Amino acid sequence: MDNHSTPIQGRRPDKRDLSTSSIDLVPGNKKNKISDSDLMENSETNQFHLSEADVDVISRKMRDLFKADVEAIVNSVVQSLIPQIISGINESLTTKITSLECENKVLKDQISEMQVQADRAEQYSRRNCLRVSGIPETEKEDTDGIILKMVNDLGANLSIDEIDRTHRLGPRKQVGSKPRDIIIKFVSYRARQKLYNVRTSAKTTDPYKKVYVNEALTRYRSEMFYDARKLASDKLVEGAWTHDGQVLVRDLKRVIHRIDKPEQITELRAKSRSYASVAASK
């Protein structure tokens, strides 16, 4: 048997055949064998050497590429979230606005009620007072005497003991201007009624035909009474007057309304215009 056996074709090489000590590129040619030392030398020869400028350029390029990608991702995410965020904000704002509107209405109602209560108390303090307008004003006049003479001329029996005090309202005006009103505070409501019950007699009695006697209303009620008389002058109600500090209005259906708030005047004006338009269409 021959000691030099021929390798079987296709035999799997063993580890010795794959030794990295040398690589035979062409069988039988020793010149083509490359050793490990040759590979190491060639790899060291083929290494890339980059300058700092090259590294900086490459890093900037990579940064720009990553920046564009990140911006695109962020924009996509933001665009998808914006509708949800806006919807949430709108819902929150709507809820907050509704809550504030409710609170505002409650506060307005409370303030309005407090104003009504305060005005009611102030008006009650004026229960024994009357306001006279249209009496000519002179220097060093005696308003007590002027009022007593007017009351007696109108047919009422009133003594000085029934008058607490009288005075002109506001600072003195220039000569020739409209005379200031006189406020009268009576000792009792009964004494006050003596003049108030004969006030209409002034329309036919000289020299009081342009003199008017009215209740001493608060500013709040005076403004409402002015608006109520404006309704009467515009023929939107039948009449407007006051009684014991209350502003009263008789509408076109002859229903009497007590006015406590300015809103009632606005409602009456709207209703009266509606009545007038319906009547005109018939």
Image (tube, grey):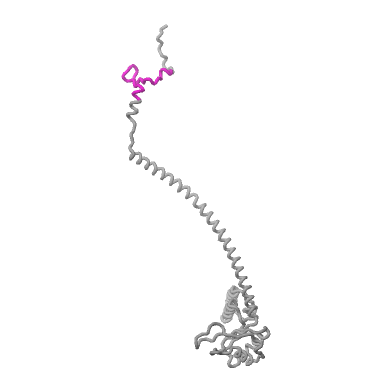
* Residue 278 visible somewhere in the drawing: no
Residue at position x 53%, y 55% from top?
Answer: 89
105 over 197 or under it: above or below: above
x and y percentages locating residue 200 in the rendered image: 62, 88
Does the rendering let one see residue 144? yes
- Which residue is at the front of the view, 172 or 234? 172
Q: Is residue 69 above or below residue 132?
A: above
Q: In which quarter of the image is the C terminus?
A: bottom right
Residue positioned most to the right: 190
- Splitting the image into 4 quarters, where does residue 237 fall? bottom right
Q: Quadrant of residue 109?
A: bottom right
- Horizontal and vertical percent for residue 78? 47, 49
Residue 215 percent across, percent down from the top left: 62, 82
x and y percentages locating residue 223 in the rendered image: 57, 78
Q: Is 27 included in the stretch rendered in magenta?
A: yes
Q: Considering the image in quadrants, where does the N terminus appear? A: top left
Magenta span of residues: 13-39
Is residue 194 found inside the magenta-colored segment of the image? no
Q: In which quarter of the image is residue 185?
A: bottom right
Comparing 279 with 172, the one in front is 172
Depicted 194 relative to depicted 32: above or below: below
